[in-house]
Image (tube, rainbow, N blue to C red):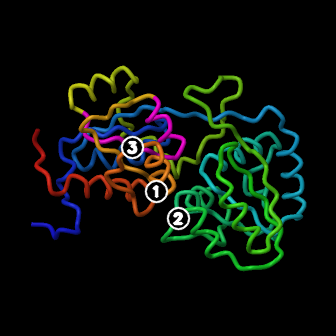
Amino acid sequence: MPLPDQPDFHALQGRRILITRSADRARPLAAILHGKGAEALVLPLIDFERVEDQGPMDAALDELQGGSFDWLVISSVTTIRVLIEKAAERGIQPRQLVPGTTRVAAVGTSSRSVLEALGIAVDLAPVGQQSAEGLVSLWAAGGDRAFLPQADIAARTLAEGLRAKGATVSVVIAYHTVDYPARPERRLAGELPPAVVASGQEAGREVTVQDVRAALDHGTLDAVVAASPSGAKRIAGNLLPLGKCRLVAIGRPTAAEAARLGLTVAATAQEPTPDGIATALESVFANEGNTR
């Protein structure tokens, strides 16, 4: 028998888990769930578009390449997709956007692994509390100049936290978060490196909102993963009531947003990674039977 505080290896056997993100972003978690005997369903609820006015981003990237910033701060994998796209426009590799004099900070291991797969060294990233607050807690006080490209709906936590440490922070909207699907002409096209998204991994079965509604009504969906605060908003707006289906959050900001929306959070991943989410899911079902 497993210890009470340890997930049961077989806890996910036969479970049906909904991942609310795009197929490429869902693939690593889907592969882990498949290996644990669960069925992964994929329903993208949010998508990402380029900003209409590219002037501020292009100007900031010119400054970045010219060595004007002490730090490049990455708050999401989607931001990296923007950098990949902008580097392609300039006919260079993403690593060439960042001069050797500029240090790079990331909010967690997922962003760090993508950056490193692109050949961009990461100088600062929290391991425990992988969030804006976690990164701010590691930031050394001083007058460094930081470039922070982020989503239009990003919280002010990171920028304000860095400024409180004495940094001069240039915030630029890098992309818009929209309901899925994005407009084809504005949809982000930057693809993550193969080292991060392996084509051979189990991809999960793509479903529609109607499919999910039927599964929820029949009680045949065991859990839904909210992969971001905006994803939690879309779950609240499109999938309620969840019935017996448990909601698992990728991290504390997502859990906080879900709670604000009145959703019950069954578990929160200790690390916002596929392995962390899988462990959180196991903790939910560890003490329950695997038959309905």
Residue type for callout 2: Gln
Image quarter where the C terminus lies is top left
Report how far apart the C-alphas of labels 2 and 3 lie in the structure. Answer: 22 Å
Residue type for callout 1: Gly
Q: Position of residue 163 (x, y in %)?
A: 77, 68
Residue 26's disc number: none
**Badge 3 element:** loop
In this view of the protein, which residue sits in the foreground, 42 or 217?
217
- Residue 97: quarter of image: bottom right
Q: Which residue is mark 1?
A: 251
Crowding around mark 2 (Cα neighbors within 10 Å: few <14, some 14 to 19, many 20+) is: many
Q: Say whether disc 2 or disc 1 marks the residue closer to the N-terminus.
A: 2
Q: Which residue is mark 3?
A: 263
Q: Say whether disc 2 or disc 3 marks the residue closer to the N-terminus.
A: 2
Q: Which residue is mark 2?
A: 130
Q: Position of residue 229 (x, y in %)?
A: 52, 46
Q: Are marks 2 and 1 in contact (CB under 8 Å)?
A: yes
Residues shaded magenta: 221-237
Q: Which residue appears at 21% of the width and 52% of the height?
A: 285
